[in-house]
Amino acid sequence: MSASKRNRFLLLQSISLGALTFPTPFLIFLYLFNIYPNHDFNRVLIILFLMISGAVIGLVSYFRNLDLQKRKDWVPSKKEYSRFMGQKNNESKP
């Protein structure tokens, strides 16, 4: 996998993890304290707002997280074997 494809994958991973994990504590809090919106439209707006907020947090963490900086720059060497059935990676082919 090239570095640019790996960076896109890490970006999508950060955004999706943020969008799916950020709303969870808020939704649990609303459920535990019996706070229910009056209309279905309000429920959808609350969930969309929380998911978009989480996606923005994931996007910010992609650019600010020092641990991800190490993974962004990593590219497998040509002699490295993949873990999948001992095959060589695609970059080793001439």
Image: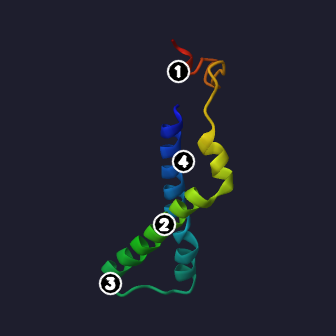
Amino acid bearing label 1: Asn
- Residue at 40 percent of width and 71 percent of height: 48
Name the secondary structure under disc 1.
helix
- Residue at 42 percent of width and 74 percent of height: 49
Amino acid bearing label 2: Val
Amino acid bearing label 4: Leu
Spatial separation of the CA atoms under disc 4 and disc 3: 37 Å
Residue position for label 2: 56
Spatial separation of the CA atoms under disc 2 and disc 1: 33 Å
Number of residues whose C-alpha sits closer than 10 Å to that of mark 1, classed few (under 14), some (14–19) or many (20 or more): few
Instruction: Please state which of residues 37 and 9 is positioned toward the viewer in this rendering.
Output: 9
Q: Is residue 67 above or below residue 42?
A: above
Name the secondary structure under disc 3.
loop
* Residue 22 falls in image quadrant: bottom right
Number of residues whose C-alpha sits closer than 10 Å to that of mark 4, classed few (under 14), some (14–19) or many (20 or more): some
- Residue at 67 percent of width and 45 percent of height: 70
Q: Which mark is residue 55?
A: none
Residue position for label 1: 90
Q: Nearer the viewer, mark 1 or mark 3?
A: 1
Is residue 73 toward the left or the right of residue 44 in the image?
Answer: right
* Mark closest to the chain's N terminus, 2 or 4: 4
* Mark closest to the chain's N terminus, 4 or 1: 4
Q: Which mark is residue 39?
A: 3
Contact? badges 2 and 4 (CB < 8 Å): no
Q: Locate residue 32, reporting x and y percent.
A: 57, 82
Number of residues whose C-alpha sits closer than 10 Å to that of mark 3, classed few (under 14), some (14–19) or many (20 or more): few
Q: Is residue 25 above or below residue 1?
A: below
Residue position for label 4: 10
